[in-house]
Amino acid sequence: MSKARDRNSGSELEPDPLLTKQEIAELYGTTDRFVEKLIASGELPAYKLGGKLVRIRRSDALALLRPIPTVRDAL
């Protein structure tokens, strides 16, 4: 697999893979249906390829993950 090159700096960038709903569900430890709800609500951007193929950028899926604030964080 080839790596994309940044046109401005010439440095190599890691590719941002497109994943299936099932792969995102595994990443989150949830069901496909939960991922479909995130897509339908607009929280998780997704892209349609052809008729029924749906793909999600890995970086978009990871961007939804955020830590839960704790009492310690408030101090």
Image (tube, helix red, strand yellow):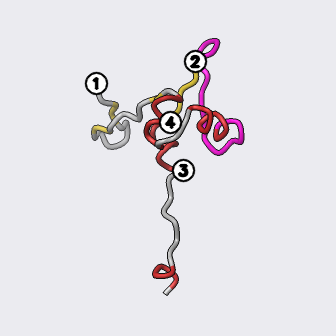
Label 3 crowd (10 A; few <14 / some 14-19 / many >=20) = few
Q: Residue 54's quadrant in the figure?
A: top right
Q: Residue furthest top?
A: 51
Q: Which residue is identified by label 4? A: 25
Give residue 21's position: percent from left, percent from top: 53, 29
Q: Is residue 46 magenta?
A: yes
Residue 74 in percent (x, y) is at: 52, 82
Q: Residues within 10 Å of mark 4 (few under 14, many from 20)?
A: some
- 5 falls in the magenta region: no
Label 2 residue SS: strand
Label 4 or label 1, whichever comes before in sequence order: 1
Whole-angstrom CA distance, mark 2 to mark 4, is 16 Å
Q: Earlier in the sequence, mark 3 or mark 4?
A: 4
Q: Which mark is residue 64?
A: 3
Label 3 and label 1: CA atoms lie apart by 27 Å
The residue stretch that appears in magenta = 39-52
